[in-house]
Image (cartoon, helix red, strand yellow):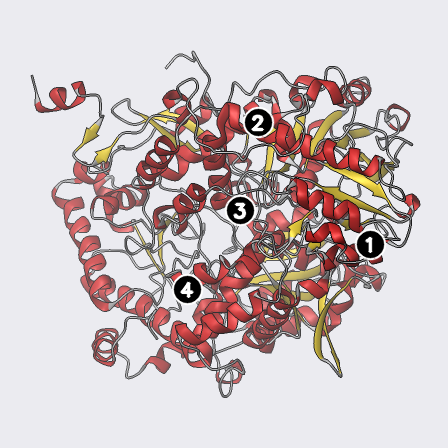
Amino acid sequence: MRYIPHTERDIAQMLDVIGVPDVDSLFSTIPEKSRLRGELDVPAALSEQELLRVLSAMAARNANTDTHDWFLGAGVYAHFLPTAVDALTSRAEFLTAYTPYQPEISQGTLQAIFEWQTMICGLTGMEVANASMYDGASAAAEAALMAMRVTKRSRIVMAEGVNPEYRAVVRTYLSGIGAEIVEVGRAEDGRSQPIAPHIDGDTACVLVQQPSFLGAIEDLASAADAAHEHGTQFVAVVSEALSLALLEAPGALGADIVCGEAQSFGVPMSVGGPHVGFMATRQKLVRQLPGRIVGQTVDTEGRRGFVLTLATREQHIRREKATSNICTNQGLCLLMATIYLSLLGRRGLRRLAEINLSKAEYAKARVRETPGLSLPLSAPTFNEFVVALDGPADAALARALDSGIIGGLDLETDAPELGPSLLVCTTELASRNAIDRLIAALPAGSDSGSQEAAR
Amino acid sequence: MSDADRRSRSGNAANGFGYEEALLFELSREDRVGYSLPELDVPAVSPTDVLPEGSVREDLAELPELSEVDVIRHFTRLSTWNAAVDLGLYPLGSCTMKYNPKLNERVAHLAGFSAAHPRQPAALLQGFLHLCYELARHLAEVSGMDRVTLQPAAGAQGELAGIMMIRAYHEHRRDHRTKVMIPDTAHGTNPATATLNGYSVVEVPSNDAGILEPAAVDAAMTEDVAGIMVTNPNTLGLFEENMAAIAEIIHAKGGLVYGDGANLNAVLGIARPGDLGIDVMHFNLHKTFSTPHGGGGPGSGPVGIKNLLAKHLPVPVVQKSSGPDGDAYVLDSDFPLSIGRLHGNFGNAGMFVRAYAYLRSLGPDGLRRCADMAVLNANYVLARLKDSGAYKIPFDRTVMHECIVSDGNFSEQGVSTLDIAKRLIDYGYHPPTTYFPLIVPGALMIEPTESESLEGLDRFIEALLAIADEVHEDPELVRTAPHHTRRSRLDETRAARKPVLRWQPNAAE
């Protein structure tokens, strides 16, 4: 086994030092009746060459952005990944280190986290951010828990515009502690119905996603004002982080907590994970934040350095009184996002967001002029929107697939009231030609693999 | 002018090839770019024309402006400030810092895994779903459990899932229980998880030998206790010899047994939690199954269960359906008694690919070899340290994958575990886990893993022995360590008292 260095001679020498006759003797504390008889029934070891062939064959059975034009988003976004991101995060000094418990030999990881926290604060308009959460969904759940600690209340109001999978995770996380969850429906135009009537003096927080799951740009300021009238925390949830480059920072609109998913910042889709949740809040609430936090300090010679700090919130110190049970963060993925944001920077990120917006507006214009297709929701959007169809959605997606296109999300499960419809996302990866081919494939009357595809 | 002054005047802030590195924001220069974007092939839209008034932000002045070269140098320099498994022994107890094979990274980067989407049709995701199904099956075999869900994103989320399934099990039987029993050697995540589930914690002490006594468990067990959370081998590196008897006591009063699989590496192919009465457990793919720790994560925390909990599994569940055209893998969400969803998608899927590659690289013999050599290494370190008499050994018995020594011999010199740990850095080692488990004052918890060779261990032991000598000869040297890092000890009190958690322009230095 090439991963294990011991030779038979090494083993003999070590057993001699320990003073036992064989390796088996080291397991003498495991009672005989507790031992496994025989060997594990797992496949025999493969060589590197054989294994690569097996896994390449498995990988080849998955459609991906290399094999198809891509219009599926719904919480996980197909953006271009600059080469430098993977080159840097593949460095073993980042990849094979762990939580920076020993700051003198972890300054690389710690400084990168400090830079991540700074950029997340800037993008969200908040004052403090943590060193990441598992994903956007658990970040939303942790935000609700945090709001319950801050307000000492247990009623949660959540817009239906929050990604349905996030809402499911919030329900799971809160199921054991007697929280009440109220969901607020969608108005005709796609935005949330007014939140105010649902908030009362027992409401810990209101969660609204920006843009909503169906792509609508919400009126965060009104929702925040309504929450604050009752001393309720306002939580803005962001699942397409690139929107932060274009839309007003939630912090500037009254959010008390901003959380979500930063996968769009250079993290591969990777079938849904590992991604990187983020969480930011006001300075005064910092001691209620879950997860790791990095702070600046000095060493004994007065030189700037960084450490994990405010650990008295955390499980390894506070045990059952901790703010959360979270231990690991998504360190490698937050590093990807930090590198990505450094490359795109102040102007590139904005420009990229405008490209996404322009592609979506172009696609929406094509939908409007195409018989059989329509835009059922009138609210403004960023890079994702709903297309209503004149026939079954699965058939429309199948026609798109015949043209080499993953055409979006069938909303049959998540928004059945809209009738046959798709959630379509246009990132910078969507070429005009691919958009035209998608639009041509969606109406019920169009042939699969139409002439447009050959263009 | 001194050498240091001359070098500093050059502005490169280097000590040879050890570089100082400013923050990104300090390196930023207006109009510098690190990106190339394609020409827009559709009409350009001005945001203010299509978005509501007041919803468009002015600028992203908070982000830096850097070239690709700037960014590459910045993060490459930062990387040189880190200790890492690929640089040398990283004996962080309970974290299983074993070698992370390069092949795993290569296969996880295949576009069919890295560039696929969780919500694409299952028919177009068969390779990945097949891998999930097989990985879950192999993990079930390794652990002796009946089924495995891969969804939890980390060990702590696996604990959450497991305790939720225990709660769902009791509640479905209309059996309302309010407490969870946890040994005093447990990781902090265990009690924190119990609280998050609305349970209060009953702590049960381990005996003088460092393990749980059936009598102590019996005394604490009532019909109000939903279950016990046991780490086996425990955090002292000891096998819980009475596991089967303890499980019987818990089961007899209607409770269930949760196994924290953090230390599973020690028993691969030797004993299986499922055979010892464990009803539900989590795996740490980033410990036992070699996925990289990434500077703090991502982890991955699949959960194995016995069939009595199957109807409470998180959804969706990957199922295999065999037909005339061969096998197909489908996503099944039809579990009305499910605890629900813990992750926005399938979990940390990229880690499944790496762990699967690892399992297939090792096979049954390789898995067993991991446990054998991990346990051999830990016992070798313990034997040599014991022979030397230099360190206090709180539990003198055969250990599993990790061993514990303490600073108990050095109190006269005023040298603590923290000082030993910091001095080890000067010798080129990441320190062991310190001050844990809590029941051993001044603990140093050493987990070499199977990746370390005999001569590598000998060098590490020589370093520990040299430091023990230094404690007696020059305690100040140890108390002020590290001396050879680019930062000396950092002021953690100051960091916590006056938190500076982000860079701000014009902030007073």
Task: Using the image, tell me which numbered label, if any, was put on residue A396.
Answer: 1
Query: Do the residues marked 3 and 4 share a common chain?
Result: no
Q: Is residue B204 left or right of residue B45?
A: left
CA distance for labels 1 and 3: 44 Å
Q: Tell me which amino acid carries mark 4.
A: Leu
Mark 3 or 4: in front is 4
CA distance for labels 3 and 2: 36 Å
Label 3 marks a residue whose chain is A
Q: Tell me which amino acid carries mark 3.
A: Cys
Query: Do the residues marked 1 and 4 share a common chain?
Result: no
What percent of the width, then of the height, locates residue A241? 62, 34
Give the residue at mark 2. Answer: A351
In terms of sequence position, does the residue under pointer 1 or pointer 2 come before the other? Answer: 2
Q: Is A5 situated above or below A139?
A: below
Label 2 marks a residue whose chain is A
* Label 1 close to label 2 by CB (< 8 Å): no
* Label 3 close to label 4 by CB (< 8 Å): no
Q: Nearer the viewer, residue B11 or B30?
A: B30
Residue shown at 73% from the left, 33% from the top = A362
